[in-house]
Amino acid sequence: MSEEGRLHLPVMSGRQSLREQVAQALRDALVAAEMRPGVVYSAPVLAAQFGVSATPVREAMLDLAKEGLVEAVRNKGFRVTELSERDLDELTDIRALLEVPTVARLADASRAEEFERLRPVAAEIVAAAEAGDLLTYVNADLRFHVELLSLAGNAHLVEIARDLRYRARLYGLKGMSERGTLVHSAREHLEVLDALVRGDAGAARRVMEHHIRHVRGIWADRPE
């Protein structure tokens, strides 16, 4: 794919600054695999697609570079960084260390009402997976995990978990959709909620651990 390849990026509008809007739209494109590792993208080309000047695009790309998502290519633009198998293994391990025990500790039947508020989001994830709507899946999936972890009351943990998900970029998402395994992964969000509503910490731990490892296995084309 050349840098001139068209991306499905929205026209910018709203209350956020252009820089923030562009950065978020580019993150979405990265996660949905619309921007590919190793490909160089120029700010003017992306700016034309956004309908903005090149300046906020360059600023947004610099923000993404700080997050490790892209790297500057002198006199050309920005290249999407590539993650090795080891990188993915390490990111998965960190996610498991942070998210699994945190979610398990949340299990409490007396908090069932809080967990049930996330059920529509989990259902949206499943519906998006069934429809092959990757961008909706990505956004709903991120919202689910962030809101679930937020129930632990640790803002720093949530910020770290969000950053890890951006870095991992849900590698292989398109392949998961094509193989039908994305739907199975999506339904695990409902299973996590069911365990939490029952107050079953052991089940919540097992499902969450399996969910994270399941996604990593699919990245490597070896479902676990």
Image (cartoon, grey):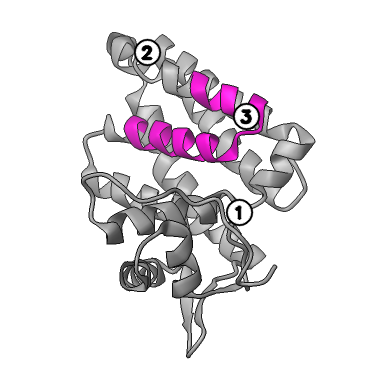
Question: Are dots 3 and 1 in contact, CB under 8 Å?
Answer: no
On-image quarter of the N terminus = bottom right
Label 3 and label 1: CA atoms lie apart by 15 Å
Ranked by sequence position, the earlier of labels 3 and 1 is 1
Going by the numbered disc 2, the residue's amino acid type is Glu
Q: Foreground: 187 or 178?
A: 178
Element type at marker 2?
helix
> Which corner quadrant of the image does residue 59 belong to?
bottom left
Q: Name the residue under label 1.
A: 33
**Residue 25 included in the magenta stretch of the image:** no
Residue that lies at the very extreme toward the bottom in this rendered image: 75
The residue drawn where x is 36% and y is 37% is: 146
The residue drawn where x is 37% and y is 58% is: 22
Q: Mark 3 points at which residue?
A: 129
Frontmost of labels 2 and 3 is 3
**Which residues lie in the magenta part?**
123-148
Residue 121 image point, x, y percent: 43, 23
